[in-house]
Amino acid sequence: MTDGLDPQLAQELLEMCKTMANTGGKKALAGRLSGLSQVETKTTSTDMVTEFDRATEKYIVDEIRSRRPDDSIIGEEGASISGTSGITWCIDPIDGTTNFLYALPGWSVSIGVSDENGPLVGVVYIPALDEMFHAVRNQGAFLNNKRIFCNDTSDLSKALVCTGFSYSPEQRTIQSRRVAKLIHQVRDIRRFGAASIDICFVACGRLDAYFEENLHQWDIAAAELIAIESGARSGNFSGGPSTPKEFMVTCTAMFDKLSNLVIASSSKD
């Protein structure tokens, strides 16, 4: 046992995550292909939720409750269950709901599990691509069960950087000004629309870096562990501990350089 890690428990939790993400994701994909009937808004007119967000979360929560009734659960669509086992599940049933709404492939089912020592298991499944990212603490990161590593890029001018924008129109204006200030100093900018996927793409080398602000715990709970296990570095924009409020993940050698650039580009000048 290392770092409080029970290998048997970790494997059990990993298999649960994989099965639930796969089953829930494929059901949601099949449902989307057959058409949407319930689309509503949440925090703003562009913050959407569909019947499949709620159905996928209900399926996952019911599965956890039936097999591990003493665990805590946090879900984007309202699940909030306090348990006594020391294990906490964090669920984003469909990360990238706008992509899902428009039948774009960039959405995922994200399930993270933590214990008293922090993130323990992370699974991010992209149904439209049939790609399953996973990690267990101190055991590496994997894509469809093949080991993955982040890039080792250190030259910021050659970095493909991803970001995201707020549901708030006012915040998007501020964020777009930051991007305008830094875009000429990196290879290029991408904006895909699902934080968990963006982070996993850093983990497997499809991106060199990703940063965003005003996320939620369920956006990063699974993917951050996958990125760290791939060799990437995460933190807030200033290099301190990451939070949903400020999140950045990059190739290790690039973090400080991008941190300085993002901070400099965030000024109101």
Image (cartoon, grey):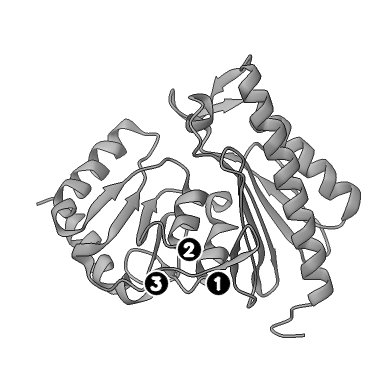
Q: Which mark is residue 203?
A: 2
| Between 33 and 233, the one nearer to me in the picture | 33
Which image quarter: residue 10?
Answer: bottom right
Q: Earlier in the sequence, mark 1 or mark 2?
A: 2
| Residue most extreme to the left | 269
> What is the x, y in percent for residue 126?
58, 44
- Residue receiving disc 1: 229
- Residue receiving disc 3: 240
> What is the x, y in percent for residue 34?
65, 18
Which image quarter: residue 154?
Answer: bottom left
- From the viewer's perspective, is residue 226 above or below residue 125? below
- The type of residue carrying mark 2 is Ala
Q: Which mark is residue 65?
A: none
Question: Answer yes or no: do the residues labelled 1 and 2 have beta carbons within 8 Å?
Answer: yes
For the residues labelled 1 and 3, the Cα–Cα distance comes to 18 Å
Left or right: residue 40 compared with residue 213: right
Kindly state the secondary structure of the residue where label 3 is placed.
loop
